[in-house]
Image: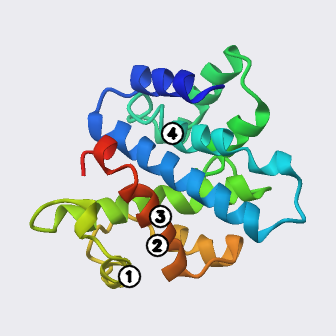
Amino acid sequence: MTREEAYKLMTGMLKNRNLQRHGLAVEAIMKSLCQYLKQKHPELSEVEFDEEEWGVVGMLHDADYELVAKDPKRHTLVTEEKLRSLGVSDRIIDGIKAHHDGIKESRDNLMEKAVYASDDISGLITAVALVKPDKKLASVTTDSVVKKFHQKAFAAGAKREQILACERELDISLEEFIGLALKAMQGNAQELGL
């Protein structure tokens, strides 16, 4: 599945512009993590690090969010059905399902571990940007996100334990992970509306 096909599918399934932007933010983070982890793990096969594939997983991870709003236990399963009908690889489908604890309990590769941690860090970074006077990602620093991370009441929906999977599952410190995610989102700020 190409990025263009994924974008068309996401915008067809998600009507809320903020949810679309969330998918684009996670896409940017996933691509950045793919590059970073490829350098960190030269012993792994090139097949593990298909940047477009990682981006598609990030973009589509919440594609069915509006469609399953009344039945969250089905989250990712509607997307899975759609992708299977299009002949999309199991690797992409499993990657999407990996971010939802209720569907896929184990994460079997770096891409699955990355999407799990990336989902909520994008929301936390967005929340930090929105409390800045200019509401721009350019005004956000790694330190400001780290500070807000430790304030549990701030962006309470951003699951800190899920974000901390960066340390447990990817062997990336929280501060470094936030820096990578922030830089990725800043590089896509216009498309993210921030």
The residue drawn where x is 24% and y is 64% is: 129
Residue receiving disc 4: 59
Q: How is the image coloured?
A: rainbow
Label ID, residue 86:
none
Residue 117 location in percent, x, y? 56, 63
Residue receiving disc 1: 146
Gap in angstroms between the C-alphas marked 2 and 1: 7 Å
Gap in angstroms between the C-alphas marked 4 and 2: 19 Å
The answer to whether mark 2 and mark 3 are in CB contact below 8 A is yes
Residue receiving disc 2: 178
The residue drawn where x is 40% and y is 56% is: 185
Around disc 1, counting alpha carbons within 10 Å, would you say few (fewer than 14), some (14 to 19), or many (20 or more)? some
The answer to whether mark 4 and mark 1 are in CB contact below 8 A is no
Locate residue 90: give its quadrant: top right
Residue 157 seen from this side: no
User: Which residue is at the front of the view, 108 or 173?
Assistant: 173
